[in-house]
Image (cartoon, rainbow, N blue to C red):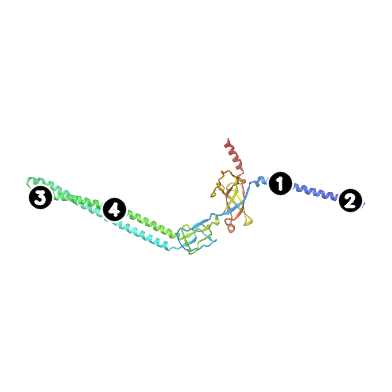
């Protein structure tokens, strides 16, 4: 009787285990189905609109600093990798030669001004000579008028015998002399007037010489100021090749200023990923150097062409051995990062970028409608 009871108990226990396993399996299947449905729903509503790439890097529009002048370097106050404010002194070139040129140019300005003053004085002198010549001409014209009247008065008297012929001849001679004197004084007035014109032309030349000398002085002053090479923007110094005592040449690259406050991300997406990508969409950024930190940003712009299109030697696809290759399109992303993060983020770091393109979902319908209208 006891053995029979034990057999029934074992049978019941086996059925209970089978029932439990069955319930676990059914629960697992139900959970799997639910998870699959949720995953499918999540992909349809969110996942398929998330575009991801690991072909992305931190960028900054660095500025190459070059020398405008030739000269010896006297000081380099900012070293490699150091931070410099906008307008900070980067390199000091020896000023001796440029100071001398500025002094020479300043002296030339003074010489030109002295020449102009002498020319203005000659104008006044010439104008006085014109006034004097005109006064003399007026006196000669009065004498001529008087003598002409005397000749007219004595001519009938001589004809009647009241006055001797000798008196008329003398008056005629004096009149002719007055005529010649008037002609001479008119020539003197003309010559004096010409001297005024000449002096004024010289004054104009002197004024032009002053402007030329001032321009040379300003150029020398600019050259002297350019011996101080300053930072065009705030950032960090990199790739510095300049040393104290070095002789630099015009246009020679000395260093690069990297604007660490103006970092951005350049992500190269496949052409199959940018259909719904628009400026303003949110971006999640993972930095390889900080794997446990998520950065955020915003799509700023999309390059108007593929990377291959802007390469130095663009591909020529009109050949017989064409192979289609998925192109990449550079996308510029504004990076939101604070001061502490920027200590780590430097241009060239590798990133993983995810762009949420859900905001552009209506664009698909708009594009389809647009093309349907075009087809009609």
| Closer to us: 237 or 295 | 237
Residue found at x 83% / y 49%: 16
Nearer the viewer's eye, disc 1 or disc 3?
A: 1
Q: Nearer the viewer, residue 180 or 142?
A: 180
Residue 311 picture location, percent across and down: 54, 49
Q: Secondary structure at mark 4?
A: helix
- Which one is earlier in the sequence, the residue at label 2 or at label 3? 2
Q: Quadrant of residue 205?
A: bottom left
Mark 3 crowd level (few <14, some 14–19, many ≥20, 10 Å Cα): few
**Residue positioned 42% across, 59% down in the render:** 221
- The crowd level at tag 2 (other Cα within 10 Å; few <14, some 14-19, many 20+) is few
Distance Cα–Cα, label 2 vs label 4: 143 Å
Mark 1 or mark 3, earlier in chain: 1
Return the residue at label 2. Answer: 7
Q: Is residue 96 left or right of residue 29?
A: left
**Disc count in the image?**
4
Q: Earlier in the sequence, mark 4 or mark 3?
A: 3
Marks 1 and 2, Cα distance to the nearest angstrom? 43 Å
Q: Label 1: which residue? A: 36
Q: Picture coordinates of residue 2 (x, y %)?
A: 91, 52
Q: Which mark is residue 167?
A: 3
Between disc 2 and disc 3, the foreground one is 2
Which residue does the numbered mark 4 point to in the structure image? 198
């Amino acid at each position: 009787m006891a053995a029979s009871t034990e057999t029934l108990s074992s049978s019941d226990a086996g059925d209970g285990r089978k029932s439990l396993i069955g319930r676990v399996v059914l629960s697992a299947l139900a959970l799997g189905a639910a998870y699959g449905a949720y995953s499918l729903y999540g992909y349809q509503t969110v996942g398929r609109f998330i575009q991801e790439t690991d072909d992305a890097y931190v960028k900054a529009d660095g500025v190459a600093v070059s020398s405008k002048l030739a000269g010896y370097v006297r000081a380099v106050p900012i070293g490699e990798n150091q931070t410099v404010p906008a307008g900070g002194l980067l390199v000091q070139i020896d000023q001796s030669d440029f100071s001398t040129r500025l002094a020479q140019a300043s002296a030339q300005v003074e010489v030109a001004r002295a020449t102009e003053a002498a020319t203005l004085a000659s104008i006044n002198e010439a104008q006085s000579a014109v006034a004097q010549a005109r006064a003399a001409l007026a006196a000669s014209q009065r004498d001529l008028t008087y003598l002409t009247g005397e000749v007219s008065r004595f001519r009938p008297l001589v004809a009647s015998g009241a006055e001797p012929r000798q008196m008329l001849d003398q008056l005629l001679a004096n009149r002719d002399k007055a005529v010649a004197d008037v002609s001479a004084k008119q020539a003197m007035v003309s010559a004096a007037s010409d001297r005024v014109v000449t002096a004024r032309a010289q004054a104009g030349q002197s004024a032009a010489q002053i402007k030329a000398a001032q321009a040379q002085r300003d150029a020398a002053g600019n050259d002297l100021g350019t011996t101080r090479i300053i930072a065009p923007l705030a950032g960090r110094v990199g790739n510095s090749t300049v040393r104290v005592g070095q002789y630099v040449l015009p246009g020679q690259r000395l260093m690069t200023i990297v604007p660490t406050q103006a970092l951005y991300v350049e992500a190269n997406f496949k052409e199959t990923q940018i259909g719904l990508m628009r400026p303003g969409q949110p971006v999640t950024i993972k930095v390889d150097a900080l794997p446990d930190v998520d950065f955020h940003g915003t799509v700023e712009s999309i390059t108007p062409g593929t990377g291959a299109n802007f390469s130095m030697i663009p591909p020529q696809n009109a050949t017989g051995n064409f192979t289609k290759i998925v192109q990449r399109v550079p996308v510029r992303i504004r990076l939101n990062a604070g001061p502490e993060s920027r200590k780590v983020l430097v241009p060239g770091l590798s990133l993983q970028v995810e762009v949420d393109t859900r905001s552009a979902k209506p664009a698909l319908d708009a594009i389809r409608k647009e093309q349907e209208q075009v087809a009609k």
